Amino acid sequence: METPTQPASTTTFQGFYAILDTGYIGDAQWEYTAQALLAGGARLLQIRAKGHPLESTRELVERVLPVAHDFDVPLIVNDHLPLAVEIPGVGLHLGQEDGSIREARQALGPNRILGLSTHSLEQAREAIAMGDLLSYFAVGPVFATATKPDYKPVGLRLVRDVRALQPPLPFFCIGGINRQNARNVLEAGATGIVSVSDPLEAPDTEVAAREITRLTNTCPGA
């Protein structure tokens, strides 16, 4: 039987959303990097292990989960619904082709975090229409990014158009966002931002995370 989980605070869905991506970090650095991101102020932490088998992804989640608990920050797994269901309290983020949001919500129960990627105004509207199922949605890639090389950047125009919808759901912007352009994204209306390569490739991940967090704290959207 699953341990009951409480719904995340609304402040969770603002500010800096961090991602631990196996494309940038070796397995030996996961706990250290997670701690650096969270100490730097990340309010959500996602594990993205594209191409990894379920067993190795499970091991990584189990290693990072205690770090997230120490900072009282929700941990989210990318794509792996069975893994999210299996590990109490873990949330889930899905892409447009990763399965049914309604089925995922039914499997996770009412209190788990559930997010969805969107890449157009139509998809954002569809996410908003699923506000009873989703905790948040993501918009992107805003700029070109090596993480999603096959996706055309949506630009700041889409961020502004989504904000104009006045969505009741919080939305994070993702894709090529760094300390140099984050302010522009936030001023366009994002509730929060996801920055992947910038903090993970920085000489000091915690310092980079603190700088990103500072930007989100000084912009009206976040």
Image (tube, grey):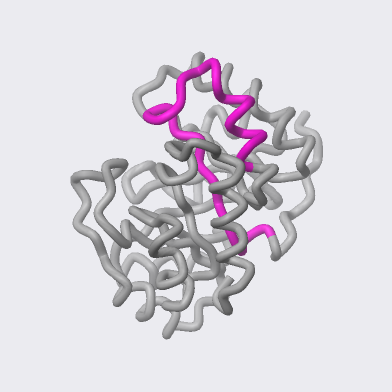
Looking at the rendering, in which quadrant would you find the C terminus? bottom right
Residue 123 image offset from top left, x and y in percent: 34, 65
Residue 47: horizontal and vertical position, in percent?
Answer: 52, 34
Q: Give residue 87's quadrant in the image.
A: top right
Left of 150 or right of it: where is 60?
right
Of the 4 image quadrants, the one containing the N terminus is: top right
For residue 32, side relative to residue 54 (left or right): right
Whether 185 is among the magenta residues is: no
Against 132, residue 31 (above or below) is above
| Residue at 45% in and 26% down | 25
Q: Nearer the viewer, residue 98 or 29?
A: 29
Residue under the point 46% across and 70% down? 183
Quarter of the image where one finds residue 126: bottom left
Name the spot of residue 54 as percent of width and height, x first. Answer: 47, 19
Residue at the spot 65% in from the left edge and 47% down from the top edge: 40
**Total count of labels:** 0
Q: Where does the magenta region start and end?
A: 12-37
* Vertical side of 171 occupied by 24: above or below: above
Identify the residue at image location x=58%, y=31%. Answer: 33
